[in-house]
Image (tube, helix red, strand yellow):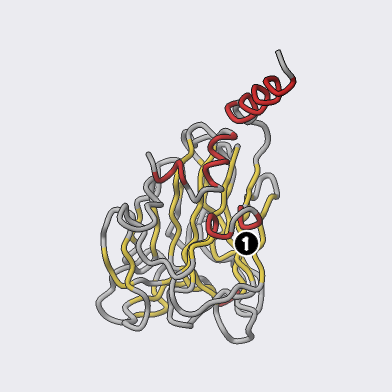
């Protein structure tokens, strides 16, 4: 066989060989292709739009018809997160999922007509709301502090974070930091640009296990300005492989072709 043949054969093996499932990792593919991990000014997540979040979502204070603020985080929450993610909306519970106990609990807000209308992954349309963290005003704080991994998690998944949906209010411009507590891993995005139209930041988790805890840290970067997100979405990746990762560089190719 010629050297050229062996080179082509080796390249093919590298493409189809599964990535070894080892320790937990979090990745953000902005450095490969900005269009993959960040969707700027994107408000439609259904099959007719980005086609993401097909395995579940959580949007805060969604579809409220009258303005409200300082509301419980679970009020009007549109929640279809998968069974392997555990979310606790009770602020009196030791497993409460939102906001560190630093004197000002996280709250939800909605019903503000200047905020973005969104189309959720299942096609539901409505006025977006927000998870607001007062402790993230020019300070780094876990607006989501405890989403537990339970049951039978997939080998890998995408966590999509929706931000900048509040028409310039509560912008987390200094930091959006996805974290995994048990392994101490994180991916930290800094100095973001917001224009009041929703953006989606997508993080790729691999190797999470039962007992792991997902967190999301925010920071507005401006004194007196709270930080917020509109919601999160999840897409499971049952068989992560080099081909799957190649598809990511093509713009969520595998997720969109399911």
Question: Which residue is label 1 attached to?
Answer: 177
Q: Nearer the viewer, residue 53 or 4?
A: 4
Residue at 63% x, 48% y is 26
Counting from the top left corner in percent of width and height, residue 9 is at 65, 22
Q: Residue at x 35, y 71 (%)?
A: 128
**Could you say where residue 166 lies in the image, as x and y percent from the top left?**
43, 78
Q: Quadrant of residue 231?
A: bottom left
Left or right of 199, for residue 74? left
**How many tags in the picture?**
1
Which residue does the image show at 35% across and 55% down from the upper left?
79
Q: Is residue 82 above or below residue 49?
A: above
Residue at the right extreme? 3
- Tell me where residue 134 appears, x and y as whole percent: 55, 77
Instruction: Give the residue displayed 38% in from the left and 72% down from the top.
Output: 129
Q: Is 66 positioned to the left or the right of 216 in the image?
A: left
Q: Nearer the viewer, residue 207 or 251?
A: 251
Q: Which of 204/222 is in front?
A: 204
194 left or right of 128?
A: right
Tell which of 7 and 35 is nearer to you: 7
Q: Quadrant of residue 215?
A: bottom right
Q: SS at mark 1?
A: strand
């Amino acid at each position: 066989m010629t050297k050229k043949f062996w080179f082509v054969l080796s390249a093919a093996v590298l493409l189809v060989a599964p990535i070894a499932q080892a320790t937990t990792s979090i990745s953000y593919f902005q450095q490969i292709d900005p269009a993959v991990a960040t969707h700027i000014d994107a408000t439609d997540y259904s099959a007719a739009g980005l086609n993401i979040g097909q395995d579940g979502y959580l949007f805060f204070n969604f579809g409220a018809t009258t303005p409200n603020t300082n509301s419980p985080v679970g009020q009007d929450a549109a929640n279809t997160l998968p069974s392997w993610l555990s979310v606790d909306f009770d602020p009196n519970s030791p497993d409460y999922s939102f906001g560190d106990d630093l004197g000002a609990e996280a709250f939800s807000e909605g019903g503000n007509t200047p905020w973005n209308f969104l189309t959720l992954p299942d096609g539901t349309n409505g006025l977006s709301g927000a998870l607001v963290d007062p402790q993230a005003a020019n300070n780094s704080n876990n607006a989501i502090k405890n989403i537990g991994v339970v049951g039978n998690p997939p080998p890998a998944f995408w966590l999509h974070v929706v931000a900048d949906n509040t028409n310039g209010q509560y912008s987390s411009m200094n930091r959006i930091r996805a974290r995994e507590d048990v392994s101490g891993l994180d991916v930290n995005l800094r100095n973001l640009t917001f224009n009041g139209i929703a953006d989606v930041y997508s993080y790729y988790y691999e190797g999470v296990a039962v007992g792991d805890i997902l967190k999301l840290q925010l920071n507005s970067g401006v004194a007196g300005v709270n930080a917020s997100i509109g919601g999160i979405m999840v897409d499971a990746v049952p068989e992560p492989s080099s081909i799957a990762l190649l598809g990511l560089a093509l713009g969520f190719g595998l997720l969109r072709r399911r």
